[in-house]
Amino acid sequence: MSAASLDTSAVRIIAAEHEHLAHNYHPLPVVIARGQGSWVTDVEGKRYLDLLSAYSALNFGHRHPALVAAAQEQLTRLTLTSRAYHNDQLGAFAAGLAELCGKDLVLPMNTGAEAVETGIKVARAWAYRVKGVTPDAATILVDHGNFHGRTTTIVGFSDDAEARAGFGPFTPGFVHVPFGDASAIEAAIDENTAAVLIEPIQGEAGVVIPPDGYLRAVREICTRRGVLFIADEIQSGLGRVGTTFACDREEVVPDVYLLGKALGGGILPLSAVVADADVLGVIRPGEHGSTFGGNPLAAAVGARVVEMLATGEFQRRAAVLGEHLETRLNELIGHGVIAVRVAGLWAGVDIDPAIGTGRQVAERLLARGVLVKDTHGQTIRIAPPIVIRATELDWAVEQLRVVLTA
C-alpha cells in the first residue's frame, strides 16, 4: 500500500504526524481508528487482521471485554495516588502476580524498559549487599543480539549499531556472551558477576530460540556460581509461547522475572520486577520509585490479566494454535521463505531476498489486509492475539503465500 492509495483523511493524519512527531519510528502507511479482538479498522473503514499485537502487548486482543470492564469500573473510582499513599487495588494485584510467578515480592513500574532498568539496579544492590561484591565493581552478563529497551543504559549493552550510534558515552558494567552458549556464560562469570540477564527467546532479533537445554544450563550455572538469573519475559511471557513464561518451556524458574507489555492488557502501560524477598528485598524506601508505578487503574487491569492467566486457558490456546501456525508456515519454506522459527503463537519468518525485504513483504501484506512488522532486514514477526481463530491464521498465511508467489 502506498501513500497515493490512502484517502484524504489518512494522508492528512500521517502528514500531521510527520510534521509534529519526532521521527523515531517508521510506521507502515495505515491509520488505525478502531480495534476489537484480532481485528482493527482504519479511518477509511478497511479491516486488517493484526498479527503483531503491539509487540505482544495485546496478547488478549484489542479491547478484551473483561479488561475493558476492569478499566471502566476503576475509572469511575480512582486512577492515581502515587506511592506516597496506599491504594485499594495494588495489594491484590501484587499478591496475584507474585502467586502466578511463584515469588514473594513485586515491584511495579510502567514500561518494559523501566522494568529492565529496575532489574539492573536490584541486581547491583544484591551484589553489594548480599554477595559482597566490591562497591561499583558489579557486572552483568548479557547476550549478543539482545533487545531490552532503548534507554541509554540499555542501548549501551546492545550490539545493534543503529540503537547505539550517537548516544554514548554508555554505562559500564556489562559483559557480552553469545546467545544460546551456556559454556560462554560459565567462562565469563567471575567474583564481580552479579547476574545473567537474558531473553529466554530473543524477540526483536527475530524470534530466535536457544538450543534445547540452554535455559536449564543457565539455571544450574547461576545457582552453582552464586549469581542471579534474570529473565526478560516482557515479550515472551504471559501466555505468548504456550506457557505462562518462556522459561516454563524448560521447567526453569529464574531468580527475577521482568514483565511488561501484556501485563497491562493492551490498555495502559504496566510492568513489574518479580522476585523472592532475599533478592527484591534489598531495595529500601527512597532508592527507587515511579509516580505512576502501581497506580490503581493499572493495578485493576493487571489483576484481571493475572486472573485470566491463572486459568491456563490462554496458554493452552497459544500452544495449540502455535502448532497449527507452524505447520502452515513450514509449507512456505522454499517458496519465498528461507526459515521459520515458532514458539507458541510467536513466529519469526525469514524472507528470501529474491522476493524482497521484510519491510516490502509487510507492505504487500498490508495491502491485503494483514498487519505484520519487519525486523533486521529480511525477517517478519508474527505474534497475533491469542484470541485469534485457526481459520483466521489460515487466511493470513494464505495472504503471505500470495504475496510471496505473486
Image: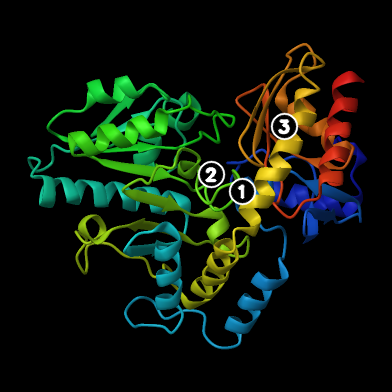
Q: Earlier in the sequence, mark 3 or mark 2?
A: 2
Q: Residue 4 location in percent, x, y?
A: 90, 37
Q: How far apart are the alpha carbons under marks 3 and 2? A: 17 Å
Q: Earlier in the sequence, mark 3 or mark 1?
A: 1
How crowded pointer 3 is (Cα within 10 Å; few <14, some 14-19, many 20+) is rated as some
Residue 70 vs 353, above or below: the answer is below
Q: Say if mark 3 contacts mark 2, CB within 8 Å.
A: no
Q: How many marks?
A: 3
Instruction: Look at the numbered discs 1 and 2 and tell me whether their residues touch, using CB distance below 8 Å.
Output: yes
Q: CA distance from mark 1 to mark 2?
A: 8 Å
Would you place residue 81 above or below residue 103 in this image?
A: below
Instruction: Find residue 376 and report its horizontal and vertical position in percent.
Output: 60, 25
Relative image position of residue 36 (x, y in whole percent)? 79, 61
Q: How is the image coloured?
A: rainbow
**Mark closer to the observer (3, 2):** 3
The vertical placement of 364 against 251, above or below, is: above
**Residue placed farthest to the top in the image?**
354
**Mark 2 highlights which residue?**
236
Q: Mark 2 belongs to which amino acid?
A: Ser
- Tag in front: 3 or 1: 3
User: Which amino acid type is shown beneath numbered disc 1?
Assistant: Ser
* Mark 2 Cα-neighbour bin, 10 Å: few <14, some 14–19, many ≥20: many
Q: What is the crowding at mark 1: few (fewer than 14 residues within 10 Å), some, or many (at least 20)?
A: many
Q: Which residue is mark 1?
A: 56
Query: Mark 3 — residue?
Result: 326
- Element class at badge 3: helix
Residue closer to the observer: 22 or 106:
106
Q: Of the residues shown, which amino acid type is indicated by label 3?
A: Glu
